[in-house]
Image (spheres, rainbow, N blue to C red):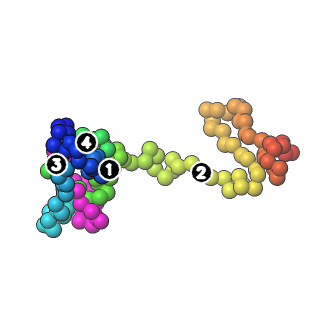
């Protein structure tokens, strides 16, 4: 930056940061998105008009260090914008478990201090190590 135009001047921290980052003291403000444009343009968006905020993506968008250029010209709802910001994709990720039957089963007896281990047929005969019962003192005493 050419700081010569500011020689002898005093800047507040906000103005100093603005000039340091942008090379100008001009304040930029994003214009509000017109009501007619307030709709998420991502085809997979489940609620394209129901959001607290919309974001117009342009060639200058650089949030989160992501490459926003493929989305230049798009309008994103808050949910889609946040998803792209965090993951770098607009596609929703599915859980690694393919069905509810794949979910781990909880044994109600675990809360009462009883530990059981189910051994699949491929592991029959394997030794299953369980942590020691912590008991009331929390010192790792073995029960039994």
Task: Please say whether residue 51 is one of the residues in the magenta stretch.
Answer: yes
Q: Is 24 positioned to the left or the right of 94 in the image?
A: left
Viewer-side label of 1, 3: 1
Tell me which segment is drawn in magenta. Answer: 41-61
Q: Are marks 2 and 3 in contact (CB under 8 Å)?
A: no
Q: Which residue is mark 3?
A: 58
What secondary structure is marked by label 2?
A: loop
How many numbered callouts?
4
At horizontal 43% and vertical 48% (from top left) the residue drawn is 95
Q: CA distance from mark 1 to mark 3?
A: 28 Å
Q: What residue do we see at 57% from left, 48% from top? A: 104
Disc 1 marks which residue?
A: 13
Find numbered disc 3 in the image and state the secondary structure of the residue it sits on. loop
Visible residue check, residue 70: no
Q: Which is more toward the observer, 89 or 54?
A: 54
Q: Which residue is mark 4?
A: 20
Tell me how far mark 3 sits from mark 4, CA to CA: 23 Å
The disc, 3 or 4, on the residue closer to the chain's N-terminal end is 4
Instruction: Report the side of 80 relative to 113 (left or right).
Output: left
Which badge, 1 or 3, comes first in the chain's sequence?
Answer: 1
The residue wearing badge 2 is 105
């Amino acid at each position: 930056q050419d700081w010569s135009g500011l020689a002898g001047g005093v800047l507040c921290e906000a103005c100093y940061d603005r000039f340091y980052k942008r090379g100008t003291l001009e304040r930029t403000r994003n214009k509000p998105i017109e009501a007619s444009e307030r709709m998420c343009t991502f085809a997979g968006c489940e609620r394209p008009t129901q959001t607290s905020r919309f974001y117009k993506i342009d060639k200058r968008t650089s949030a989160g260090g992501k490459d926003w250029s493929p989305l230049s010209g798009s309008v994103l709802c808050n949910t889609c914008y946040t998803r792209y910001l965090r993951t770098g994709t607009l596609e929703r990720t599915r859980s690694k478990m393919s069905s509810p039957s794949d979910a781990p089963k909880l044994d109600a007896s675990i809360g009462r201090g009883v530990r059981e281990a189910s051994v699949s047929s491929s592991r029959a005969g394997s030794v299953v190590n369980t942590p020691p019962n912590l008991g009331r003192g929390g010192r790792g005493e073995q029960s039994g």
